[in-house]
Image (spheres, rainbow, N blue to C red):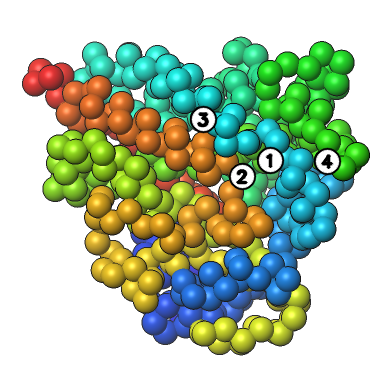
Amino acid sequence: MDFNPLSPEVTANPYPYYTELRNKAPVIWLEPFQCWALSRYADVDFALRNPQIFSSSVFTAEALGDLNPVSEVPWILDMNPPDHTRLRKLANKGFAPRLIRTLEPRVQAIIQELIEPIRGQSESDLVSMFSGPLPTIVIAEMLGVEIERRGAFKVWSDDIVRATSRPTDEAERIEIRESLAGLRAYFEQMIEHRRTSPGDDVISALVQAEEERDMLSATEILALAVLILVAGNETTTNLIGNAVLTLLNHPDELAKVRADPALLPALVEEVLRYDSPVQVIFRRTAQDVELEGGKIPAGQNVFLLLGSANRDERQFPEPDRFDVARNPQDHVAFGYGIHYCLGAPLARLEGRNALEALLFDCPPFSCATERVAPIASLIVRGPQTLPLRFDTAGA
């Protein structure tokens, strides 16, 4: 069967295609991408749990090509042990759970700052006014970025996502390349400054991080900072956008959450399962491997379809039913194992607090358009814009 994850039909709604893949071709060769794709939960889970078989290799660098702003070193996503183990230990110091917990009051304050102008409007775009700025501000503050640079930060994040879609238009490629050169120059200056004038931020923590007399190089810190910028922005923006759109499409489930705020943590987990912000991650086989759905030779590129695995009827009863009380703890929206998403606790914290504010501090709302266009991306899934109409008269 033909399956192109970048086709407009699949981008609009990949889930019927995933179902067909799981049932007819769970291990499939995708000729245009020169890679295999795994769609069943058991196979994706096996690949995530066995990095010695499914190597992370250098996929980020390959996906970005000459648009990669940090080509001298592998991204942590592309590393295998022992190099990954060393870098992850040091990177974890900037995302320790205790540090994330201390952020909640500030995250709540930022949410209220963003919500305030929305409350009095009859219509507002969720993405540009709320779900986009929120993680941008949080990540910028965590990294120690000046307030006046927040706008540039969002542009840089969006441009890296554009780069992963491999644009062929040369004018667009030049625009992205120049934008990301500015990103690199900014971070290089910041890293150098933090070596002599550290602050209370993640960049300073990474500069000072040391494990068994081993420290991060400036280029490694640069690659981590770029990754934190992109992952911290895109995942949370799309988690919030997907949650709101899904709730609007399931008014009975929305009513359940409005009636019981204690469901908010479970709601976040169900959205992560039902409409995963990250749909695809990449691996390469280090040896021949036989899976539940078929065989793959050594040295082959592989797409792990996280969005499909999270809708697998073999793992989740009635997977296409959105249930705010389901509270799935075994979804793979953040990956698993050594490459489990570094920022997962932060994304959950932001998502839970953002949805609480939208559902309980704002007037009732509905979607102000018949069609919501998704982001054109192989990797991430979320609405480009989400115009909401607020019932200010009935508030």
Front disc: 4 or 2: 4
Residue that label 4 marks: 211
Dividing the picture into quarters, in which one does residue 313 lie?
bottom left
Q: Earlier in the sequence, mark 4 or mark 2?
A: 4
Circle 2: element type: loop
* Front in this rendered view, residue 200 or 180: 200
Residue 76: assigned label: none
Identity of the residue drawn at 41% across and 22% down: 108
187 over 327 or under it: above or below: above
| Residue furthest right in the image | 213
As measured in the structure, the alpha-carbon distance from the residue carrying label 3 to the one carrying label 2 is 14 Å
The residue pinned by badge 3 equals 101
Q: Position of residue 69 (x, y in %)?
A: 76, 39
Are the residues tagged 4 and 2 within 8 Å (C-beta)? no
- In this orientation, which residue lies closer to the viewer: 35 or 288? 288
Q: Disc 1 or 4, which lies upstream in sequence?
A: 1
Residue type at mark 4?
Glu
First of labels 3, 4 by sequence position: 3
Q: Secondary structure at mark 1?
A: helix
How far apart marks 3 and 1 lie (CA) works out to 14 Å
Q: Are marks 3 and 4 in contact (CB under 8 Å)?
A: no
- Badge 2 amino acid: Leu
Which residue position is annotated with label 2?
A: 342
Q: CA distance from mark 1 to mark 2?
A: 7 Å
